[in-house]
Image (cartoon, rainbow, N blue to C red):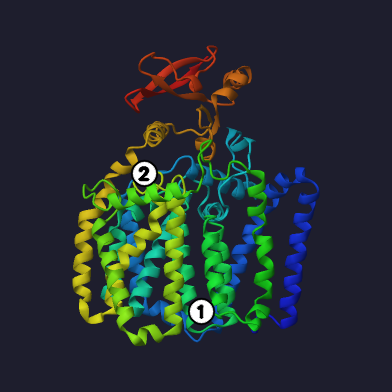
């Protein structure tokens, strides 16, 4: 890093970062009522700063390394093209839809706020008129801000569209495939590396949640990117590599907050194994000092949303040993489900188990492998990170392996299982040829990819079917100048459409009807769940009788109720 900053410059920067942190945190500590405004107004710029800092230290590390970036991409050019094509196949074949509602639309809403106001609010209610969306309710979001920021970058490039998070996930998927290819090629051969990508593409849970608006795939990519950087660091520790690893883990920790556990585990292990000396700390003064400032939005968010952080039902512990053993049992039983319904490749899961046992056997028998300090420590940190992350999910009250809203937590598990055949070849090159691996990968793709394409697993969700029906209707409404009444208005406010819930509509009926008469909106659409028994809207969907409704479309959602879409008539 000396090529970029002098020692004095590093300390000056460190001081500036610490002063910036103090300047922002002090007013919110002394005046709690300022915290929400500070969070909303400054978080975007802090996240932008963290990404720029990360990019700077990645570039600095690459410039100081002996490896040629140009040579790397030339050598892996075919792998890059193949990774992009593989991601394109997944996005062309898997259903293009929000899979986890309302998480994904909340992330979209925050990205909308970041794009057009450089603020960090979750817009849940608003009106569209005069060619712009105008927010009316902007609570503090509970989800991390990094993925919405990445989505806002997409918006800057192609304009605002509801599918922008999917574009961000396409980049994440192609990047994950390319990372898998590059690592596999380094330790095996090009054909085996192609097989590794096909194995990953064959694993349904990766594909299902890649073609979504969630942050789970992006988080998984940064998990493996961070540990790849860790490997290079332990092989040849330098301050520039440490700064790159540190800032990558900082970005990773702001995609999903449980990633903080991995951050702490990796850094704690590096200190314990004596990979971090005083010189490294001194030369990394700037990124280390910037970290409190970067995590300030997280601190504000946790305080402002206290009591709603984990969204566990009353009386249910968000994390517990009981959850762990219950979910672990369900996880084990699910491994013997070969009905092609769950989005998992049990063949690869069992192969991974066998590979782990065989590699453990090799480790015990191979004196040379055991004596290799960097590799030994890397394997220990990787294994601990993998176990800690999946163990944390299993202890969570929503850590059920076979649930459609919770299977996304197991993407990292799926990636490790997917590449296990190639990992085995890396350990024992003569065990199997690359062509055999590729043939096996194609066979698994043919067998398991249709599970992701059919989408039967996700279609079991009532809310998913409900909103899927609504969006099918809205695709035929070629007009943004509308207002939607729905009990989850944030779903459509996130897309830049005017929307409010039934409480808002009933409390503002005169204003809404007058705005419709004056054509501020061309239409007001009402989405209601109708009870089959009473043929009336469910209690939370009741609308004031002064809204005269004309039924336009109806669709069964469950055996107990159906969706009715109406327009307000004057």
Where, by quadrant of the figure, is residue 12 drawn? bottom right
Q: In this view, does 147 lie to the left or right of 98?
A: right
- Residue 297 to residue 514: above or below: below
- Residue 564 to residue 138: above or below: above
**Which residue is pictured at 51% across the width and 34% down the height?**
480
Q: In this view, does 154 lie to the left or right of 188?
A: right
**Which residue is pictured at 26% across the width and 80% down the height?**
428
Mark 2: which secondary structure? loop
Q: Is residue 366 left or right of residue 132?
A: left
Between the C-alphas of marks 2 and 1, the distance is 38 Å
Image coords of residue 92 (percent x, y):
32, 52
From the viewer's side, name the closer residue of 71 and 226: 226
**Which residue is pictured at 32% across the width and 79% down the height?**
364
Q: In which quarter of the image is the N terminus?
A: bottom right
**Which residue is pictured at 39% across the width and 50% down the height?**
325
Image coords of residue 319 (percent x, y):
50, 48
Image coords of residue 400 (percent x, y):
39, 46
Q: Are marks 2 and 1 in contact (CB under 8 Å)?
A: no
First reached walking from the N terminus: tag 2 or tag 1? 1
Mark 1 crowdedness (10 Å alpha carbons): few <14, some 14-19, many ≥20: many
Q: Residue 403 carries which label?
A: 2
Image coords of residue 414 (percent x, y):
35, 59
Which residue is label 1 attached to? 233
Q: Is residue 189 visible?
A: no
């Amino acid at each position: 890093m000396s090529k970029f900053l002098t020692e004095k410059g590093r300390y000056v920067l460190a001081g500036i970062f610490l002063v910036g942190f103090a300047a922002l945190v002090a007013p919110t500590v002394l005046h709690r009522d300022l915290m929400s405004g500070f969070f909303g107004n400054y978080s975007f710029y802090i996240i932008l700063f963290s990404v720029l800092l990360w990019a700077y230290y990645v570039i600095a590390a690459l410039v100081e390394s002996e490896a040629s970036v140009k040579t790397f991409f030339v050598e892996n050019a075919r792998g890059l093209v193949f990774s992009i094509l593989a991601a394109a196949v997944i996005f062309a074949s898997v259903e293009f839809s929000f899979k986890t509602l309302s998480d994904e639309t909340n992330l979209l809403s925050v990205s909308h706020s970041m794009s057009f106001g450089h603020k960090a609010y979750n817009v849940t209610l608003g009106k569209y008129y005069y060619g712009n969306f105008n927010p009316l309710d902007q609570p503090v979001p509970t989800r991390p801000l990094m993925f919405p920021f990445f989505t806002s970058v997409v918006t800057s490039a192609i304009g605002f569209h509801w599918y922008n998070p999917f574009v961000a996930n396409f980049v994440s998927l192609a990047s994950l495939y390319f990372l898998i290819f590059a690592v596999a090629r380094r330790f095996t051969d090009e054909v085996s590396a192609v097989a590794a990508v096909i194995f990953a593409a064959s694993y349904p849970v990766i594909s299902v949640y890649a073609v979504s608006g969630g942050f789970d795939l992006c988080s998984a990519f940064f998990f493996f990117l961070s540990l790849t950087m860790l490997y290079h660091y332990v092989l040849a520790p330098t301050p520039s590599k440490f700064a790159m690893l540190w800032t990558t883990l900082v970005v990773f920790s702001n995609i999903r907050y449980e990633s903080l556990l991995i951050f702490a585990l990796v850094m704690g292990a590096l200190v314990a194994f004596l990979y971090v000396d005083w010189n490294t700390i001194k030369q990394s003064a700037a990124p280390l000092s910037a970290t409190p400032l970067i995590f300030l939005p997280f601190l504000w968010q946790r305080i402002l949303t206290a009591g709603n952080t984990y969204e566990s039902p009353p009386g249910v512990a968000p994390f517990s040993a009981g959850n762990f053993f219950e979910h672990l049992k369900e996880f084990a039983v699910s491994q013997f489900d070969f009905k092609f319904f769950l989005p998992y490749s049990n063949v690869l899961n069992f192969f991974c188990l066998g590979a782990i046992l065989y590699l453990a056997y090799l480790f015990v028998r191979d004196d040379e492998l055991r004596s290799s300090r960097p590799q030994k420590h890397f394997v220990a940190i990787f294994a601990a990170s993998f176990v800690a992350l999946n163990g944390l999910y299993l202890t969570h009250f929503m850590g059920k392996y076979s649930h459609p809203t919770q299977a996304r937590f197991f993407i990292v598990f799926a990636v490790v299982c997917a590449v296990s055949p190639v990992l085995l070849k890396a350990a024992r090159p003569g065990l199997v040829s690359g062509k055999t691996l590729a043939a096996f990968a194609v066979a698994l793709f043919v067998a398991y990819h249709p599970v992701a394409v059919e989408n039967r697993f996700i279609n079991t969700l009532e809310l998913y079917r409900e909103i899927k029906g609504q969006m099918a209707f809205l695709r035929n409404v070629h007009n943004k100048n509308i207002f939607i009444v729905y009990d989850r208005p944030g779903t459509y406010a996130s897309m830049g459409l005017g929307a409010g819930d039934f409480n808002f509509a009933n409390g503002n009926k005169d204003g809404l009807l007058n705005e419709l008469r004056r054509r501020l909106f061309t239409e007001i659409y009402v989405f209601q769940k109708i009870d089959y028994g009473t043929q009336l809207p469910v209690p939370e969907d009741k609308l004031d009788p002064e809204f005269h409704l004309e039924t336009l479309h109806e669709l069964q959602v469950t055996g107990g109720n159906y969706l009715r879409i109406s327009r307000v008539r004057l």
